[in-house]
Amino acid sequence: MNTTSSILITGATGFVGQNLREYLVAEGREDIVSLSRSNTKGQEKVLTYDQFFADATCSATHYVHLAGKAHDLKNTSDDQAYFDVNYGLTKKLYDKFLADSEAKNFIFISSVKACADEVDGVLTEESPCKPITAYGKSKLQAETYILENLPKDKQVYILRPCMIHGPGNKGNLNLLFAFAKKGLPFPLAAFDNQRSFLSVDNLCWVILKLISGDIPSGVYQVADDGTFSTNDLIRLMADALGKKARLWAIPANLISACAKVGDKLHLPLTSERLQKLTESYRVSNQKIVSSIGEPMPISAEDGLKKTFKAFI
């Protein structure tokens, strides 16, 4: 199957992939070919990875590599599994791109966690990369391979999105929303944090701009404008539910002590979960916005409101 003059998407059945397909079709781009681990019934233009890599005639104009092994919050995954997928598959696909005479650009969806698991201040593209987890290390290894093999006649983009949210998302925001939906008091209001988020609509917009524009190759962080505290999120969730936010500012040292007890007794509140809920992680989007020359089309607050309405 020849896929010339098309947009090749890996991970098209995932959360970002499904939203990206819908977004591109709505923008008049129906020349989409999906790569999947197995044939998908009812969908045209779907190739398995084996078919794509085995057929030398398979080519595409734009490569969008979304597929990857996501961070396992339960820490049950083998470390090597991250490198097999996040590095191994990326290398194989990128080598195919380099040999594809019809290909014009390659977009690799990495992660801010390829650079840092914790942020002191604001994360930028110039921040030194020191990932701690196998997830972050495997993403960084893939980035390094790509940057060491940049072609002169093609454009290559490494995107580092922060926490992505939107319709169909099943991450931490969904769990927090389930808590807010019960109307229970939020006991962590004493913690003051600021986090960056990314609407999947804004990510799709960035990808389309990279496909259709003439933007320099490089590493780009992707985030909405502005930041939100966990307390801000609780208020927005309560508003979406038509309820009043109930914020309890229990002393932080008391909460931390309870979390340590949770570590030993395997309770819902553990030190790791407390850190995820209360840590700050601010990400700069200045480079990508300046390179595109346009602001993000959806404000951070409107994007979050859309996500919360979808949760309902």
Image (tube, helix red, strand yellow):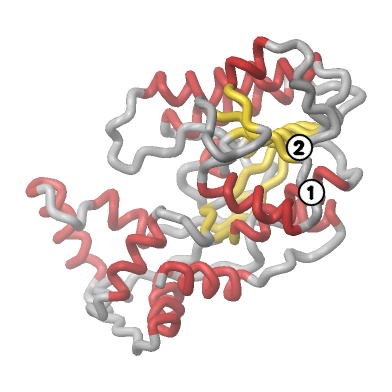
Q: Secondary structure at mark 2?
A: strand
Mark closer to the chain start, 2 or 1: 2
Vertical arrangement, residue 28 with respect to residue 58, above or below: below
Inspect this view and state whether residue 155 appears. Answer: no
Task: Name the residue at 65% across, 60% down.
Answer: 201
- Depth check: give the residue in front, 124 or 75: 75
Kindly indicate the quadrant of the structure image that contains residue 56.
Answer: top right
Q: Give the percent coordinates (x, y) of residue 39.
A: 53, 28
Q: Residues within 10 Å of mark 1 (few under 14, many from 20)?
A: some
Amino acid type of disc 1?
A: Arg
Vertical arrangement, residue 175 with respect to residue 214, above or below: below
Q: Secondary structure at mark 1?
A: loop
The numbered dot on residue 277 is none
Task: Name the residue at 29% across, 57% down.
Answer: 274
Task: Find the distance from the CA under tag 2 to the CA under tag 1.
Answer: 8 Å
Q: Give the percent coordinates (x, y) of residue 268.
A: 18, 56
Task: Name the residue at 59% across, 69% down.
Answer: 303
> What is the quadrant of the C terminus in the image?
bottom left
> What is the quadrant of the N terminus in the image?
top right
- Depth check: give the residue in front, 34 or 247: 34
- Depth check: give the residue in front, 21 or 206: 21
Task: Name the residue at 63% across, 43% down.
Answer: 160
Amino acid type of disc 2?
A: Ile
Q: Residue furthest front?
A: 42
CB atoms of marks 2 and 1 within 8 Å: yes
Q: Residue furthest left?
A: 265
Q: Give the percent coordinates (x, y) of residue 240.
A: 44, 81
Give the labeled residue for mark 1.
29
Give the labeled residue for mark 2.
7
